[in-house]
Amino acid sequence: MFFRTAWSLVLRKGGLGIRGIHSPGDTAPSKGKMPPYTNYHAQRSYPMPDEPFCTELNAEQQALKEKEKGSWTQLSHAEKVALYRLQFHETFAEMNHRSNEWKTVMGCVFFFCGFTALLIWWQRVYVFPKKPLTLTDEWKSQQLQRILDMKGNPVQGLASQWDYEKKEWKK
């Protein structure tokens, strides 16, 4: 309880930070930031940013802003589009437009898969040693014959499946 009251006093005094109205996931509006660094952030889920896209206006843009304060019927279509571009970076159609970035991503994925396959092939040929003698087919057949000759595990194992009179596997 003491912590809660102390915390509210700190916030009321403005000791740790200034509370402000801001968009979700963003800080309070940027005052005094350099021109290229603004808090402009528009996306489909939150299309109304806190700040306009263009904060530094030239003489022509300022004249257009003054003309905006009058009747909009006097504005031409090009002027309305220019005013929109001062406020927003892109339209919903431009936001929803698919990019061709997937081609680059898939190209990189296939490149790295091919490079990995090449690396594995090179390791099998030049790095890994040859197969040990015990993995050859001849050795495996001799080992199986030895197990059958010793009658290893005759109840449920390999020897139970071998017919010793006919010298072949039981059917």
Image: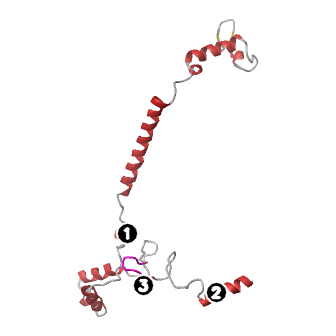
Q: Are circles 2 and 3 on residues that touch, CB within 8 Å? A: no
Q: Position of residue 115 (x, y in %)?
A: 41, 41
Please tell me which residue is depicted at 72% across the width and 20% down the height of the picture: 157
Q: Which residue is mark 3?
A: 32
Quadrant location, the N terminus: bottom right
Q: Is residue 74 magenta?
A: no
Q: Which residues are magenta?
A: 30-38
SS at circle 3 = loop
Q: Which residue is mark 1?
A: 95
Q: Earlier in the sequence, mark 2 or mark 3?
A: 2
Q: Which residue is mark 2?
A: 10
SS at circle 2 = helix
Q: Amino acid at mark 2?
A: Val
Please tell me which residue is depicted at 46% across the width and 36% down the height of the picture: 120
CA–CA distance between discs 2 and 3?
A: 25 Å
Quadrant location, the C terminus: top right
In this view, the mark in front (2 or 1): 2
Q: Is residue 32 magenta?
A: yes
CA–CA distance between discs 2 and 1?
A: 41 Å
Q: Position of residue 68 (x, y in %)?
A: 30, 89
User: Residue 38 lies in what quarter of the image?
Assistant: bottom left
